[in-house]
Structures are given as structure tokens and as C-alpha cells.
Amino acid sequence: MAFFEDLGKKISKASQSVVDKGKELADITKINLSISDEERKIDECYKKIGKLFVEKIGDRAEGEFYELVSEVLGAEKKISEYKQQIKDIKGITVCPKCAKELQADAVFCNHCGAKLDGTEEQ
Ligand SMILES: [Zn+2]
């Protein structure tokens, strides 16, 4: 009988360790999620630091910063050129007075009333 008692104890010990392992895994998963949350916060801060740096320092950046800032400024310039290409395709122009988008063939701005034939009107 002692054999079966021992076996029973061994089995319950083994199943207890399966439960423990399951709890361990759940705990580790929870902790890993917390790590991911913190890493996401760090990434967000780095992004903000980078944007702030480009805003405040811009093309006055030096050394290795200069390369990265130049890359950002170059990409921003390209984006605005691409956006202009889309406006050209759509036949959209921008009012020189109020900066609203208008049809390229418009004579007057329908937002501020400015004349759009290129002559300044006060
Ligand atoms: Zn206008």
C-alpha cells in the first residue's frame, strides 16, 4: 500500500508542479507585457526627442546629428514636392492670400475673395 501512497504523492506533486509552471508562465507573460509597454513609452519619447531636436536645432545640427537631421529635412522636402505633384494632377492651386485650396482655373478665391490672376489686390 505504501507504494500506491507514494505514487499518489508523486502524482500530486507532479500536477502541483504543472500548476506552478502554468502560473510561472502567466506571470512571465504579464511581466513581458509590462516590458513591452515600457519599451513603447521609450520609443515614443525617442520620437518626440527627435522631432524636438529637428524643430529646435534643425540644420544647425553638427556631426552625426547633421546626417540624420539632413535626412529628415530632405524627406520632408520630398513629401511636400510629392504633395504638390498630387495637387498639380488634381488641378488644385493654393490661394496666395488665405492658403485654401482652389481649382487651378479659379479667378477669385471662394474663401477670401482674393483675385487669382497673379495681380495683388489690396
Ligand atoms: Zn483665399
Image (cartoon, helix red, strand yellow):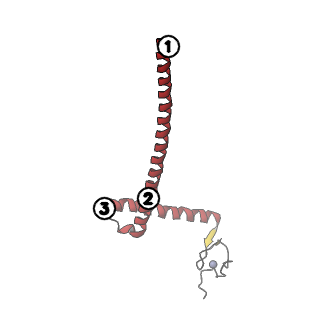
What is the crowding at mark 1: few (fewer than 14 residues within 10 Å), some, or many (at least 20)?
Answer: few
Which label lies toward us, 1 or 2?
1
What is the crowding at mark 3: few (fewer than 14 residues within 10 Å), some, or many (at least 20)?
Answer: few
Disc 3: which residue? 63
Residue at horizontal 63 percent and vertical 68 percent from the top: 92
In the depicted structure, whether residue 29 falls above or below residue 55: above
Measured from the top left, where is residue 88 in percent x and y?
Answer: 60, 65
Disc 2: which residue? 45
Q: Earlier in the sequence, mark 1 or mark 2?
A: 1
Measured from the top left, where is residue 85 in percent x and y?
Answer: 57, 63
In the rendered structure, the answer to whether residue 22 lies left or right of residue 101 reads left
Q: Quadrant of ligand 1?
A: bottom right
In the depicted structure, whether residue 59 falls above or below residue 41: below
Disc 1: which residue? 4
In the rendered structure, the answer to whether residue 63 lies left or right of residue 96 reads left
In the depicted structure, whether residue 19 falls above or below residue 36: above
Residues at marks 3 and 1 touching, judged by CB atoms closer than 8 Å:
no
Query: 65 or 9, which is in the foreground?
Result: 9
Q: Amino acid at mark 3?
A: Gly
Q: Secondary structure at mark 2?
A: helix
Query: Residues under labels 1 and 2: Cα distance?
Result: 61 Å
